[in-house]
Image: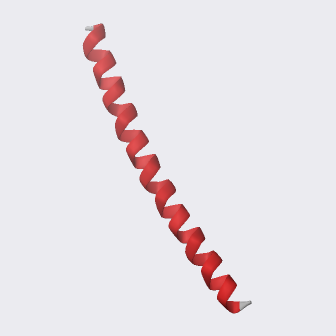
Amino acid sequence: LKRFRILSSRYRNRRRRFGLRFNLIAGIYNYELALGYHQVAE
């Protein structure tokens, strides 16, 4: 039971870190997209 708890907590941490990285990439992508849109608009 303890081993399963460690495994699940480790998986949850990895998932959170992956989600954080994905949010960062999505934010940068959206920022560049908005930048490109503004340049096209001008």
The residue that appears at 38% across and 45% down in the rendered structure is 25
Image: 16 above or below 37: below
Q: Total marks drawn? A: 0
Observer-nearest of 18 and 38: 18
Residue 23 lies left or right of residue 35; in this view the side is right
Q: Residue at x 30, y 8 (%)?
A: 41
Q: Residue at x 40, y 32 (%)?
A: 30
| Residue drawn 68% across the image and 83% down it | 5
User: x and y percent of residue 10 in the render?
Assistant: 56, 76
Expressed as whole percent of the image width and height from the top left, the position of residue 9 reads: 61, 77
For the view shown, which residue lies furthest in the top direction? 42
Residue 32, position in %: x, y?
Answer: 31, 30
Q: Seen in the image, is 10 located left or right of residue 26?
A: right
Q: How is the image coloured?
A: secondary structure
Given residues 12 and 39, the one toward you in this image is: 12
Q: Vertically, is 42 above or below 13?
A: above
**Could you say which quadrant of the image residue 3 lies in?**
bottom right
* Outermost bottom residue: 2
Find residue 38 and report its horizontal and vertical position in percent. Answer: 30, 16
Quarter of the picture containing the N terminus is bottom right
